[in-house]
């Protein structure tokens, strides 16, 4: 289980003073425009059926995604001067992919800050936490500028919570590995969408991998691509364990 850095906080019952202290503990900086940060934790599903014109975190998420990608790209470019574009792209995608951002968001306690309350299986599978993580980056950038945002990402996130060398050495592209296995053994393979479910926060895709009509255990996720990756991982594990 990932240990939380920040205790539970709810906007409706906690004054701004405590929220500001929480953000300072996360970022290392005292926030200026508090409303930016509050918006960062309003997921779109919270305002989807509201008649009020309440801003959600989608725009901040868009900005945060671009800023985070630029900072990570610059870091990797300088850290690995002899590596090609394909390598740099692959490692950057491992750091900023939805699953990794989801884990980082929970580790920083951002799930407790999120205004949209998710429960049960939705809480585990939802991309809302990763979205909030990127939105926080976007809010921090608008509030503090690029240099301080870069320092926050490198010193508070990469340094303590991302093992870049491990990401370099661990192969996570299970779809490619499953494809290579099937081609090597002359097996016809494909990914089967077993079920599509509409939830309050969007669709979930239940997917399994199939090789020569052998169906392996399925995996469900909001992202079809993530579900296929996990389905391939499950299939390879079942094949390995016979």
Image (spheres, rainbow, N blue to C red):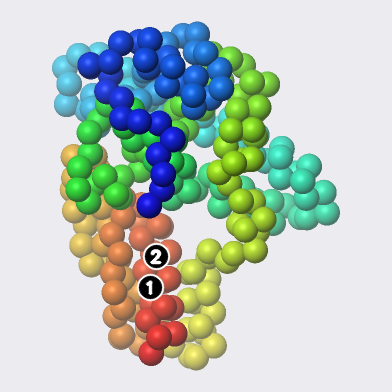
Measure how far apart labels 2 and 1 are at the Cα level. Answer: 6 Å
Q: Which x, y percent locates residue 105?
A: 42, 38
Point out which mark residue 234 bears: 1
Q: Which x, y percent locates residue 134?
A: 47, 32
Which structural element holds mark 2? helix
Q: Residue at x 22, y 51 (%)?
A: 121
* 157 sits to left or right of 188: right
Q: Residue at x 31, y 45 (%)?
A: 126
Q: Which x, y percent locates residue 173?
A: 53, 65
Which structural element holds mark 1? helix
* 47 sits to left or right of 158: left
The residue wearing badge 2 is 230
Q: Residue at x 26, y 52 (%)?
A: 204
Q: Quadrant of the C terminus?
A: bottom left
Asked if the residues shown at circle 2 and circle 1 are in contact, with their CB atoms under 8 angstroms apart, the answer is: yes
Q: Residues within 10 Å of mark 2 (few under 14, many from 20)?
A: many
């Amino acid at each position: 289980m990932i240990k939380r850095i920040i205790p539970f906080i709810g906007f409706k019952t906690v004054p701004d003073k405590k929220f500001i202290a929480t953000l300072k503990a996360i970022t290392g900086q005292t926030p200026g425009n508090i409303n930016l940060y509050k918006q960062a934790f309003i997921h779109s599903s919270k305002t989807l059926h509201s008649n009020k014109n309440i801003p959600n975190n989608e725009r901040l998420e868009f900005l945060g995604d671009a800023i985070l990608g630029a900072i990570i790209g610059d870091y990797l470019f300088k850290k690995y001067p002899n590596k090609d574009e394909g390598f740099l792209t692959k490692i950057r995608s491992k750091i900023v992919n939805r699953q990794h951002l989801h884990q980082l968001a929970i580790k920083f306690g951002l799930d407790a800050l999120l205004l949209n309350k998710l429960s049960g299986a939705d809480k585990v599978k939802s991309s809302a936490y990763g979205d909030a993580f990127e939105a926080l980056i976007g809010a921090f950038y608008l509030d503090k500028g690029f240099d301080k945002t870069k320092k926050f990402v490198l010193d508070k996130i990469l340094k303590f919570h991302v093992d870049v060398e491990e990401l370099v050495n661990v192969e996570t592209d299970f779809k490619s590995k499953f494809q290579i296995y099937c081609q090597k053994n002359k097996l016809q393979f494909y990914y089967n969408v077993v079920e599509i479910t509409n939830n309050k926060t969007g669709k979930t895709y239940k997917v399994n991998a199939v090789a020569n009509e052998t169906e392996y255990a399925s995996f469900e996720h909001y992202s079809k691509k993530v579900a296929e990756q996990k389905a391939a991982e499950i299939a390879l594990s079942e094949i390995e364990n016979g």
